[in-house]
Amino acid sequence: MGGPAVSRDVSTLGRTDAWDGVRAVVAGFGASGAAAVDNLLHLGADVHAVAESVSPKLLERVELLEVLGARIDIHEGATAALPDDVDVLVVSPGFRPDAPIIVAARERGVPVWGEVELAWRLRDPEQPAPWLCVTGTNGKTTTVQMLDSILRAAGLRSVAAGNVGLPLTEAVMDPEPYDVIAVELSSFQLHYTDSMSAESAVVLNVAEDHLDWYDSMDDYARDKGRIYTNVQRACVYNVADPATEELVREADVIEGARAIGFTLGTPAVGMLGVVEDILVDRAFIEERSTSAAELCTLDDLASSAPHFVANALAAAALARAHGISQAAVRDGLKAFRPDGHRIAVVAEHDGITWVDDSKATNPHAAASSLAAFEPVVWVAGGLAKGAAFDELVTAVGGRLRAAVLIGRDRQVIADALSRHAPDVPVFQVESPETGGAVGDDLMRRVVAAAAEVAQAGDTVLLAPGCASMDQFTDYAARGDAFAAAVREHVGTS
């Protein structure tokens, strides 16, 4: 009679080992899940992918991977149970630790890896590209893209990968090796990562977010802090956010790694900061006890908003830790332009500036955006993901001309405004939660309401502080609808 197959120990397997006979289950079929399936097949593993759904743009890849030998089950309930005879479970970052498939793996002693963990194990042992890693509640993507721009300006073959850009398994398995990889990591990805040893890493900030996934802020912060484990050169932290420095203090790093702060003020020794309108380095120069090295000016940056400058300093710190010159830092930051929906000016009309920061999907990001403008007609709302807005309103209430609120959790924001800024007029714009044309009509009404109250010199700012999926497919669709409605309103569409 047959019985369960003997489990294969995968703990020491890497890129040059034989994966034949390894039974891998990949849970989730987004970009990172598809990359994991592809590369595990390439190594010779027996791969079974399970997912509840797949985006239309990945359907072709499903078919190709099935031809190459993967078994792929995509249907409702496909991830409800762990298949039999599994040596390793590779999970997409959206799976909570209490998901049944993960609980089953833990109970059966099956290793649980994220795609990031798999990628770390698959680096080329002969010439592994160092990882410069970035996490934080907000600013991760901008910082990683800035860092990639700096590294390229230095003449290095670099790529932005991880939570943005290329999946990490594809980056490390590229036949033409990269010199260095700029890695964005979410707290979810870090939760399922154990063996990574970044050359240098930064936690940009830690603020309330994803409390629908985590039991507490401490758990969320702890996962962010995992990025510092085994750092080799520099643990970069935000002087303005003491929680990030505390995570550095608690980290178990490689001997010789330095703690490097960044600040929007004058930097102390061992920090990067701003003197007048110049970004400077007092950490990576020999004369740091008496002087600072100029990196670039505020005018060199695409925005002088405080959070944008902070991101630039963090990117510069990681680059300087890697040995990048001052000139390359300047050139890379000068060349960088942020993606859409990040503090993007949509129009200026009748003295009113309309700004799209739809990427501000939690209160901390919205507060950073609001701090860059005054006075503001604030457009906010959506899915709050369990977050509160009292701290935000207390900090920025004095900047607000009015608030225009949308989305399922708009009342959460309205209540915070009532408690801490009762004089700020609040307009709630209702709409069914179906997106598409409904979303376009919603934004026309939002723009009309904002135009009624805005005065010359004001900024109408879409900085929702919430996720978008109750009314839009994603934050980009929300920003696009806002921008289109603004252009229609001012007559430039």
Image (tube, rainbow, N blue to C red):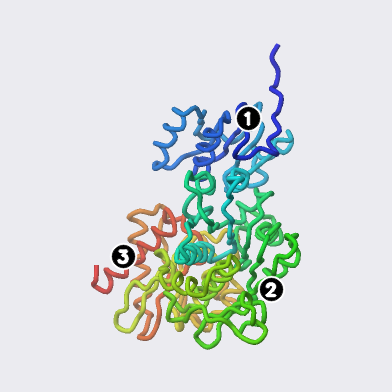
What's the residue type where badge 1 is placed?
Val
User: Is label 3 or label 2 in front?
Assistant: 2
Residues packed near mark 2 inside 10 Å, few (<14), some (14 to 19) or many (20 plus): few
- Name the residue carrying label 3: 484
Front residue (pair 228, 176): 176
Residues packed near mark 1 inside 10 Å, few (<14), some (14 to 19) or many (20 plus): many
What's the residue type where badge 3 is placed?
Ala
- Name the residue carrying label 2: 242
What's the residue type where badge 2 is placed?
Pro
The circle drawn on residue 22 is: 1
Residue 159 versus residue 420 in the image, above or below? above
Under tag 1, what secondary structure? Answer: loop
Q: Earlier in the sequence, mark 1 or mark 2?
A: 1
Under tag 3, what secondary structure? Answer: helix
Residues packed near mark 3 inside 10 Å, few (<14), some (14 to 19) or many (20 plus): some
Viewed as shown, does residue 103 lie left or right of 162?
Answer: right
Front residue (pair 418, 215): 215
